[in-house]
Amino acid sequence: MYAIFDDKGYMSLTFDSLEEAEKSVGEWKDNYLGEGVDFDSYVSIVKFIDVDEDDFVEVKRWNIVVDEEMHKEIGSPEDNGCDFVFWAKWEESVI
């Protein structure tokens, strides 16, 4: 059993396979990004060792990083009338 988990403590419904979780994680990351992120924001896919005990291990993780390319292309968010301070994107980390 797998699930999507984030730094805010939210967890998705469970998935029977890693492939099913991977199909849903993109939408999860897009929604999270739209709500606003911090430098320590992350989303991960976890595998349950014991579902009854909420015992799991992280198998994939994406961290927020500054999207330098967007800053170079169009300037800062403030220059574009946005109320946040940096363009962000997800970067997969090695576990």
Image: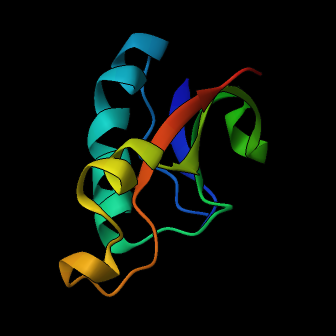
At 36% from the left and 59% from the top, the residue drawn is 33
Looking at the rendering, which quadrant does residue 81 occupy? bottom left
Q: Is residue 10 above or below residue 95?
A: below
x then y, percent, for residue 26: 31, 35
At 46% from the left and 47% from the top, the residue drawn is 68
x then y, percent, for residue 93: 67, 28
Q: Is residue 92 above or below residue 19?
A: below
x then y, percent, for residue 83: 32, 87
Q: Is residue 50 visible?
A: yes
Which quadrant: the N terminus? top right
Looking at the rendering, which quadrant does residue 34 occupy? bottom left
Comparing 12 with 41, the one in front is 41
At 36% from the left and 50% from the top, the residue drawn is 72
Which quadrant: the C terminus? top right
Q: How many marks?
A: 0
x then y, percent, for residue 87: 39, 60
Q: How is the image coloured?
A: rainbow
Q: Is residue 42 above or below residue 34?
A: above
Left or right: 95 in relation to 14: right
Comparing 79 with 32, the one in front is 79
Q: Is residue 17 visible?
A: no
